[in-house]
Amino acid sequence: MPKRVDHDQRRRHIAGALLRIAEQRGLQHASMREVAAAAEVSVRLVQYYFHTKDELLLAALGYLAEELGARVARRIEDLGSPPVPRDVMGATLTAVLPTDAESVRLTRTYAAFYSLVLAEPDLTKHGALHPDLLERLLANQLRAAQEAGTAHADLDPDLTAAGLLALTNGLSSSVLGGQRDADAALRILTYHLNGLFLPT
């Protein structure tokens, strides 16, 4: 009896090989052949599941976003129920900050995609690298805090959320680049996050 093939698992396996290449040495010169070698499959199989390199890149980026989303969800779940908006925002942003092996890997891999977009800006036409989900989560939590009277009422939730995520991404780059360590980055992030909320 022929063995059943799990096509989603195959796609994820191949995309995972690309993500490992991204984290280890970037994507500028990664080829379908290199991805096939890293995944220990044939080039033909890679091309069967992903017809172009851009298709593979975008699929891999989607799987990377899933990983980050799962990390954020775990951090929020660890807060207990029901968590307050301040804690949800903190858990979300610190999940993004490179403070442990998993988040360093995620941040390095995202950085590889950002670097690739500088060389191949057409990738953004496919919706790559948009942080909409995290921004919406942060904005909604800030709105909830404002309604509860625990956050400053004059803040624009959408602009504040975008700014917080941009700050976190900038801090992440500074940690990867050795400008500051994770503890210093965390103190800066906490300072700015605490400034959104009223004293208790």
Image (cartoon, helix red, strand yellow):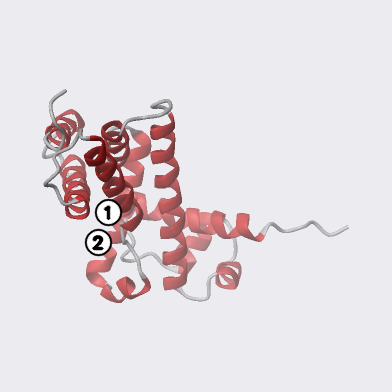
Residue 165 image point, x, y percent:
22, 48
Position of the N terminus, as image quadrant, is: bottom right
Position of the C terminus, as image quadrant, is: top left
Residue 59 image point, x, y percent:
47, 63
Q: Which mark is residue 115?
A: 2
Label 1 to label 2, Cα distance in Å?
Answer: 6 Å
Q: In this figure, which residue is indicated by the disc labeled 1?
A: 111
Q: Nearer the viewer, residue 69 or 50?
A: 69
- Say few, some or many: other residues with alpha carbon within 10 Å of mark 1 (under 14 / 14 to 19 / 20 or more): many
Question: Could you tell me which secondary element the residue under label 2 belongs to?
Answer: helix
Q: Residue at x 11, y 35 (%)?
A: 195
Q: Give, as a three-letter code, the residue at label 1.
A: Ala
Q: Give, as a three-letter code, the residue at label 2.
A: Ser
Q: Are marks 1 and 2 in contact (CB under 8 Å)?
A: yes
Would you identify the image quadrant in which residue 48 lies?
A: bottom right
Residue 134 image point, x, y percent:
32, 50
Vertical comparison of 148 with 113: above or below: above
Q: Nearer the viewer, residue 129 or 158?
A: 158
Residue 159 image point, x, y percent:
17, 54
- Say few, some or many: other residues with alpha carbon within 10 Å of mark 2 (under 14 / 14 to 19 / 20 or more): some
Q: Residue at x 27, y 54 (%)?
A: 111
Tell me if 107 is positioned left or right of 47 in this view.
left
Q: Nearer the viewer, residue 123 or 134?
A: 134
Question: Could you tell me which secondary element the residue under label 1 belongs to?
Answer: helix
Q: Nearer the viewer, residue 82 or 183?
A: 82
Would you identify the image quadrant in which residue 21 lies?
A: bottom left
Vertical comparison of 99 with 153: above or below: above
